[in-house]
Amino acid sequence: MTASRPAVADAPGVMRTEGWADYALIDSGHGRKLERYGPYRVVRPEPQCLWSPRLSEAQWAKADAVFDPTDEEDAGRWRFQGKPKETWPMGWGDVRFNARFTAFRHLAFFPEQAANWAWLDQRVRAASGQPKILNLFGYTGVASLVCAAAGAAVTHVDASKKAIGWARENATLSQLDDRPIRWICEDARRYVQREVRRGSRYDGIILDPPKYGRGPDGEVWKLFENLPELSTLCAELLSENASFLLLNAYAERISGAALAGLLSDKLADRGGKIEWGELALCQDGGDREIGMSFYARWAS
């Protein structure tokens, strides 16, 4: 008997990330956000913060680092007060990872993803045996390590050799070197195409593509042009008893509804349920939220 089309949630959800021991959104406003990353306070641009800050400008001026953007998207330069360390350890749950000041305004991980990490941890722990998880565009590996710590065998794919190196450092920091994690430096589409030809199967897939990117051999990735094909291939890689497919995107022109529609199309014979919406960072105090990205997630 053929399974039915997945049930798509009637309304969007908001997956909220609140501060934890090593991170907090302290204040926001006037196109900026003031955050705490371990011992450091950081100011970064955030155009969505249309309101006025709550703290005084003197409090904001005490930040250890400020990112000044240039005209190029996400590019810019850091200004430091004092001498922050180049890298410093942070943690979430059972996972440890290094924060660092990158040239692209973020700190080598995305704190709003903690809402996804909690969901992934829950799905992996609820699975029987040792589920096989594929993490595409895995960057510095926090999601991969969350899954590995929960008992999964993980294949982590990223086109950046530097990011793979940072992810392996994070695995060592988390004392997860002995877990079954495969580190693959390759273009995501090329890897998935080959896995389909091999007949490989995964019990869960994490798909967190950029709006634009390049593979190690110059392959060009464009979200709106390439995501439908990659989603088709990922659907083919899901095992018969697969648990989930999580899709996340940061592009301004995308929406959770669009991502849900894509998964509903590609997983038409899978049954299960598709939830969709946005990820939001919650400011200390809980009455302000910043929508950071959109998601759709299929669960069996």
Image: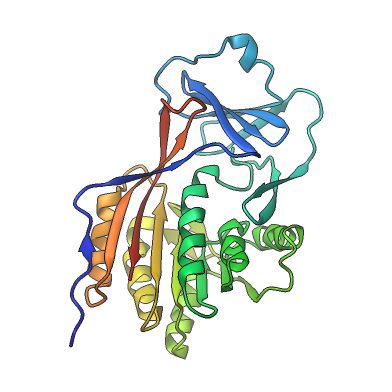
Residue 45 pos. (x, y %): 52, 28
Is residue 153 depicted above or below 30 in this figure? below
Left or right of 259? Residue 36 is right
Residue 264 vs 22, above or below: the answer is below
Q: Position of residue 27 (x, y in %)?
A: 53, 23
Q: At 62% from the left edge and 62% from the top edge, which residue is drawn?
A: 145
Query: Quick check: 2 above or below 90?
Result: below
Answer yes or no: is residue 259 visible: no
Depth order, front residue of 131/209 = 131
In percent of the image, x 37 and y 64: which residue is there?
226
Query: Residue 106 falls in which quadrant of the image?
Result: top right
**Which picture quadrant has residue 292?**
top left
Q: Quadrant of the C terminus?
A: bottom left
Q: Height in image: 179 above or below 161? A: below
Instruction: Estimate the x, y position of residue 128 in percent, counting from the top left.
Output: 48, 78
Query: Relative to the observer, which residue lies in front, 187 or 241?
Result: 241
What residue lies at 71% left-to-right and 25% top-to-bottom?
A: 64
Residue 134, percent from left and from top:
51, 72
Image quadrant holding the N terminus, namely bottom left
